[in-house]
């Protein structure tokens, strides 16, 4: 277990890395015995620093919902992070060149909640009842931690990803909002294009067999810490696809077919 001072020190390093857009050394090298609870403690300390700097919490993101990503980090459960107000971009936004370090994008469904959702024992039907509408979204990922340590060649672990607010950096919503019972979310598909070329495709079923399952998982996990999803929160349910690099000069379009498109230009 990490000490309270170690938690604060790790959070301070991540806060400064984001402010200066300079990646830090892999944290798990310094805290090899750190647990998942430690990772969420660092994340919470990081978010407290951001809120103290004037930001506001607006929702949640869920990650590592696919088996491939879980295998890559040697973990068998999803993870979560917190969405803050400065992470939200409008559809067709131009993303400033100096905003992120190494941005990547994923196609997802965003849930906008109409009522509180508190665990334990939340299921998919509870999620559908608590949801106002769903809408297509692009999540922007970034990492304030090196992906590979240049000396040891060690890769990031689940600890690094969770501590770094689940690699969360931005969210773009667009397309056509839909009531949750008016769509078969398992069959909502997305085609992600970079500069007009298809990079990835996927279906909602790739997210724990149903995107609402991720929201239920989050509500139940938060209940263990006395927290919950609130009315008005935006919740990213997890990606359909593998992350795609968003380079300077790239135009990214996520095409959700009958549900519309979401796009951004990375300056």
Image (cartoon, rainbow, N blue to C red):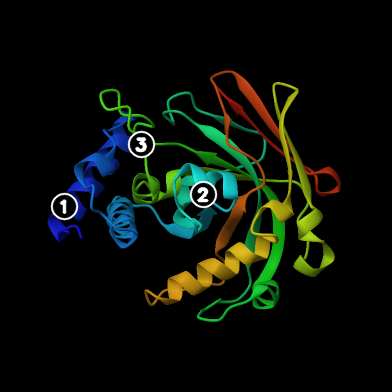
Front one among 165 and 149: 149
Dot 2 falls on a residue whose secondary structure is helix
**Which comes before the other along the chain, label 1 or label 3?**
1
Residue 160 quadrant: top left
Q: In the image, is residue 43 above or below residue 127? A: above
Which label sits on residue 16?
none
**Which comes before the other along the chain, label 1 or label 2?**
1
Q: Where is residue 164 shown, x and y percent of the image?
A: 36, 46
Quickly name the residue at label 3.
144
169 horizontally vs 160: left or right: right
Quickly name the residue at label 1.
6
Q: How many marks?
A: 3
Residue 88 at least partly seen: no
Residue 128 at least partly seen: yes
Q: Where is residue 68 shown, x and y percent of the image?
A: 58, 44
Q: Quadrant of the N terminus?
A: bottom left
17 horizontally vs 4: left or right: right
Residue sitting at x 59%, y 62%: 214
Quickly name the residue at label 2.
70
Residue sitting at x 63%, y 72%: 114
């Amino acid at each position: 277990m990490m000490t309270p001072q170690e938690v604060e020190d790790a959070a301070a390093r991540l806060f400064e890395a984001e402010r200066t857009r300079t990646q830090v050394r892999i944290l798990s090298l310094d805290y090899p015995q750190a647990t998942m609870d430690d990772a969420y403690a660092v994340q919470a300390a990081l978010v407290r620093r951001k809120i103290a700097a004037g930001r506001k919490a607006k929702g949640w993101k869920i990650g590592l919902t696919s088996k491939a990503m879980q295998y890559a980090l040697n973990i068998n459960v999803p993870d979560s992070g917190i969405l803050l107000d400065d992470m939200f971009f409008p559809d067709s936004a131009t993303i400033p060149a100096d905003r992120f370090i190494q941005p990547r994008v994923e196609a997802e469904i965003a849930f906008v909640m109409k009522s509180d959702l508190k665990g334990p024992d939340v299921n998919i039907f509870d999620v559908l009842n608590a949801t106002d509408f769903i809408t297509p979204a692009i999540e922007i990922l970034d990492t304030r931690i090196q992906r590979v340590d240049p000396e040891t060649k060690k890769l990031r672990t689940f600890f690094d990803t969770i501590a770094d607010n689940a690699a969360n950096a931005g969210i773009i919503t667009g397309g056509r909002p839909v009531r949750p019972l008016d769509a078969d979310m398992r069959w909502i598909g997305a085609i992600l294009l970079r500069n007009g070329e298809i990079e990835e495709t996927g279906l909602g079923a790739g997210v724990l067999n149903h995107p609402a399952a991720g929201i239920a998982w989050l509500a139940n996990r938060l209940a263990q810490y006395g927290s919950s999803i609130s009315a008005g929160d935006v919740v990213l349910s997890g990606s359909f696809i593998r992350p795609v690099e968003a380079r300077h000069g790239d135009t990214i379009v996520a095409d959700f077919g009958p549900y519309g498109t979401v796009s951004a230009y990375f300056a």
